Amino acid sequence: MRTRVTRSFSFEAAHQLPWHPGKCKRLHGHHYRFEVTVEGPLDERGVVVDFDDLKRVVHAEVVDRYDHQFLNDFLDNPTAELLAADAWKRIEAAGMHVVALRLWETPDSSVELLAE
Ligand SMILES: [Zn+2]
């Protein structure tokens, strides 16, 4: 049996995709939402990770970094896919065992990254 825990986050940010043939070429913003899933053994407290600890790490590494920013200042090509990968790497580098991350760019469109 494996145990996974997931927490949801959101932030607002602007970007533009110069390669895009349509309207995404122009400067615009999104209300990004994302879900981070971590997996691991239960500790002596009976949890994979304290939800508060996960929140603290994700806010420090991702939300505080990107909220109300122009994402092109941070990423050369801020697609949902590459933004999700950047978030994954930052959260993992902060010590969380990430196994899945889903990023919603719009209410209808999301990308999901999964551990190999
Ligand atoms: Zn966009």
Image (cartoon, rainbow, N blue to C red):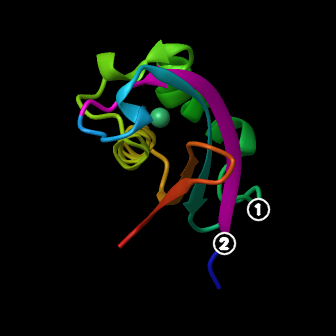
What's under tag 1, amino acid-wise?
Gly
Query: Marks 1 and 2, how far apart in space?
Result: 11 Å
The image shows residue 105 at horizontal and vertical percentages of 56, 42
Residue 15's spot in the image, x, y percent? 42, 24
Q: Quadrant of residue 56?
A: top right
For the residue labelled by badge 2, is the local secondary structure a helix, a strand or a loop?
Answer: loop
- The extreme bottom residue here reads 1
Total marks in image: 2
Pinpoint residue 37: horizontal percent, then vertical percent. Answer: 59, 57
Q: Is residue 33 left or right of residue 112?
A: right
- Residue under label 2: 3
Task: Say which mark, if any, is on residue 35.
Answer: none
**44 vs 95: above or below:** below
* Relative height, residue 15 to residue 2 (above, below): above
Residue 40 in which image quadrant? bottom right
Residue plotted at (39% across, 24% down):
26
The magenta segment is 4-18
Q: Is residue 4 above or below residue 47?
A: below
Please say if the residues under marks 1 and 2 sit with CB atoms less than 8 Å apart: no
Dot 1, how many residues are within 10 Å of its Cα: few (below 14), some (14-19), or many (20+)? few
Image point (55%, 54%), residue name: 110
**Residue 17 vs residue 92, the one in the foreground:** 17
Give the residue type at disc 2. Answer: Thr
Q: What residue does disc 1 label?
A: 46
Observer-nearest of 20 and 108: 20
Question: Is residue 6 located in the magenta-colored stretch of the structure?
Answer: yes
Q: State whether the magenta stretch is mostly helix, strand or loop.
A: strand
Residue behind label 2 places its C-beta within 8 angstroms of ligand 1: no
Q: Nearer the viewer, residue 6 or 103?
A: 103
